[in-house]
Image (cartoon, rainbow, N blue to C red):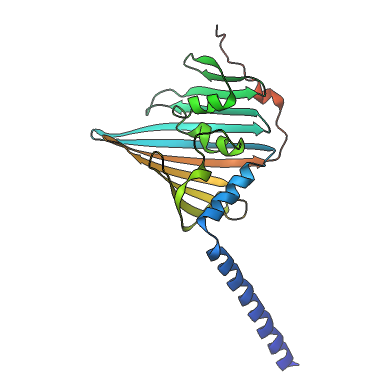
């Protein structure tokens, strides 16, 4: 009986070892391109998406560093209900300014607490027009959600490489490096191994007189949940003519 138990133990241990080896082999055989494509397919098929996060951009100048900070919220219901709002701090100790880009499914608007209120030609036009002032926030995830029409999405990254793994928001993540070939902007992405969600992005771009380094984090991601339609009918606090 004792020999039989030992044999069963060895057999179970061997099977567990094989399973672990198989898992490691599967993980190591996946390519950066496959990880990126899986991410793109996921976002392109969500019926609804919500998250919160922050963006911090550091400008490295000859005179020193300047830091711009933003916090944001994203709401999306397919096909075209959309809201991306962010609070921007242009420099340390400055007041936070609320900015909102939203579409009620028919019309798209932009509101900045500093006084700007515009009707945009389309949702894509609003996303593009606010890309710079939002430090890329209106494009990173939104352009994957709406599937097409953006100049660039993370799916278009080239020279991809899988450079490691990490854990963010309780999720094991692949770390992928890539580059936007049109403007030579370098990216590093943290993508969930199990759910293919984007949790973190770092980008770096060199100019003649300064260097721009951006970190973008996505938290509290909620998928396929009902979102109140009033979210997509934002009303500015102040009456704007």
Residue 210: % across, % down: 29, 35
Q: Is residue 107 above or below residue 155?
A: above
In the foreground, 209 or 232: 209
Residue found farthest to the left: 62
Q: Is residue 101 above or below residue 216?
A: above
In the foreground, 55 or 36: 36
In the foreground, 182 or 18: 182
Residue found farthest to the top: 241
Query: Which residue: 52% across, 38% down?
Result: 140
Residue 5 shows up from this direction: yes
Q: Is residue 24 above or below residue 12?
A: above
Quadrant holding the C terminus: top right
Residue 166 shows up from this direction: no
Query: Which residue: 39% across, 24% down?
Result: 94
Query: Which residue: 60% across, 51% down?
Result: 38
Quadrant holding the N terminus: bottom right
Horizontally, is 203 left or right of 148 in the view?
left
Residue 154: % across, % down: 51, 43
Query: Which residue: 56% across, 63% down?
Result: 27
Residue 135: % across, % down: 44, 32
Q: How many marks on residues?
A: 0
């Amino acid at each position: 009986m004792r020999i039989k138990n030992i044999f069963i133990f060895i057999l179970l241990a061997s099977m567990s070892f094989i399973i672990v080896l198989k898992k490691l082999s599967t993980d190591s055989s996946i390519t950066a391109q496959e990880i990126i494509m899986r991410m793109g397919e996921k976002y392109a098929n969500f019926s609804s998406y919500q998250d919160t996060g922050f963006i911090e951009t550091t400008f490295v100048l000859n005179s020193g560093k300047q830091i711009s900070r933003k916090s944001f919220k994203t709401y999306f219901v397919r096909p075209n209900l959309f809201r991306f709002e962010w609070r921007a701090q242009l420099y340390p100790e400055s007041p936070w300014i609320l900015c909102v880009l939203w579409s009620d499914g028919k019309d798209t608007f932009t509101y900045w607490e500093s006084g700007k209120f515009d009707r945009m030609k389309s949702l894509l036009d609003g996303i593009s027009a606010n890309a710079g002032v939002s430090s890329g926030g209106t494009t990173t995830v939104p352009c994957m959600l709406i599937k097409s029409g953006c100049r660039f999405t993370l799916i278009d990254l080239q020279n991809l490489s899988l450079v490691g793994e990490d854990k963010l928001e309780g999720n094991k993540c692949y770390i992928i490096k890539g580059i936007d070939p049109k403007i030579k902007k370098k990216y590093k992405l943290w993508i969930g191994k199990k759910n293919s969600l984007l949790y973190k992005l770092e980008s770096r771009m060199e100019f003649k007189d300064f260097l721009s380094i951006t970190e973008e984090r996505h938290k509290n991601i909620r998928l396929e949940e009902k979102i109140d339609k009033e979210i997509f009918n934002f009303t500015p606090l102040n009456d704007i003519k």
